[in-house]
Amino acid sequence: MSESRYGPEFWRAIWANGGAAFTAGERGQLLATHWPELEVPPECKVLVPMSGKSPDLAWLASHKFEVVGVEISPIACEAFFAEHQIAADCTAVGAFMRWRGGGVTILQGDFFDLDGTYAAALDRGALVALPPQDRRRYARHLRSLLEPGGVLLLVTVEYDPMRRSGPPFPVFPDEIRQVFPGAVERSRRPLRRARWTAVGGADAVVWAMRV
Ligand SMILES: C[S@@+](CC[C@H](N)C(=O)[O-])C[C@H]1O[C@@H](n2cnc3c(N)ncnc32)[C@H](O)[C@@H]1O
């Protein structure tokens, strides 16, 4: 369990205060562009760590993947299914509450308690939600959940760390190559929203890695 101020309690409070602004971020065509390049066969199990109520869950399910999100906040889980008008069933499974409906599973609990294996993972907003001291452990755990030959699509953000503090944290290529060996940069584009121009600009960077 993280002891940093950006641990599970921080995120539960964000959701309790209705402050899930990150869900409305600039998603663009990222999945449509980059996911097919990974050649993940349909029906495979795809992990979305720290999923929130991300529309990516619905996108992956609609493309016939068996998608499993992991999210600490019950508010986010409930919101995902309510917004997609899906009646979800909710059952206790080990350390998690499992929400399931419409081809999407969200395991509500701490990502660090997750086990099992997955053919692929999508990290958008997970690594960058963690402060530097928690990222190595996170990456090690995520890698351990991928099958041999499994793939990761990762989205990071880069901006001047002197201009802003708190999540999303900027994570730069040197660190990505350390924690996800073999990761290759696939694309980089400037983020245009006012919150980013206010800090001198930011880039969204897409990485792919095969275990
Ligand atoms: C920046 S948000 C990104 C959400 C989502 N991936 C998206 O693209 O909209 C980070 C999410 O991680 C969740 N989270 C933080 N720590 C977690 C943990 N230890 N286990 C599971 N979820 C966690 C938060 O509640 C929050 O929904």
Image (tube, rainbow, N blue to C red):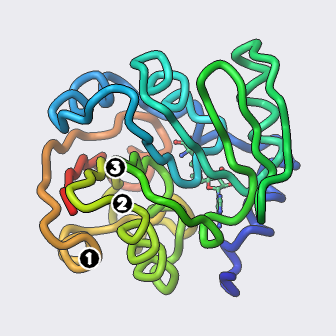
Relative to the observer, which residue lies in front, 18 or 52?
52
Residue highlighted by disc 1: 175
Could you say which is closer to the camera, residue 103 or residue 79? 103
Q: Position of residue 67 (x, y in %)?
A: 51, 36
Q: Earlier in the sequence, mark 1 or mark 2?
A: 2
**Quadrant of res 41:** top left
Residue at left 18%, top 33%?
Answer: 39
Q: Amino acid at mark 2?
A: Leu
Q: Which residue is mark 2?
A: 146
Image quarter hosting the N terminus: bottom right
Instruction: Quote the CA–CA distance across marks 1 and 2.
Output: 20 Å
> Image point 22% across, 63% down: which residue?
211
Say which element carries label 2.
Answer: strand
Quadrant in the picture for residue 29: top left
Image position, residue 14 (x, y; %): 77, 54
| Most foreground residue, 185 or 152 | 152
- Image check: 122 left or right of 188? right
Local crowd size for mark 3, using a 10 Å CA cut-off: few (<14), some (14–19), many (≥20): many
Crowd tier of the residue under label 1, counting other residues whose Cα lies within 10 Å: few below 14, some 14–19, many 20 or above: few
Residue 42, given in percent of the width and then of the height, sits at 33, 26
Image vertical order of residue 184 relative to residue 161, above or below = above
Q: At numbered mark 1, what does the secondary structure look like: helix, strand or loop?
A: helix
Some atom of ligand 1 lies within 8 Å of the CB belonging to the residue at label 1: no
Name the residue that disc number 3 marks: 155
Q: Residue at (42%, 20%) from the top-left corner?
A: 64
The residues tagged by marks 1 and 3 sit, at their Cα atoms, a distance apart of 13 Å
| Image: 118 above or below 62 | below
Q: Decide: marks 1, 2 in contact (CB < 8 A)?
A: no
Looking at the rendering, the quadrant in which ligand 1 lies is bottom right
In the image, residue 140 lies at what x, y percent? 39, 77
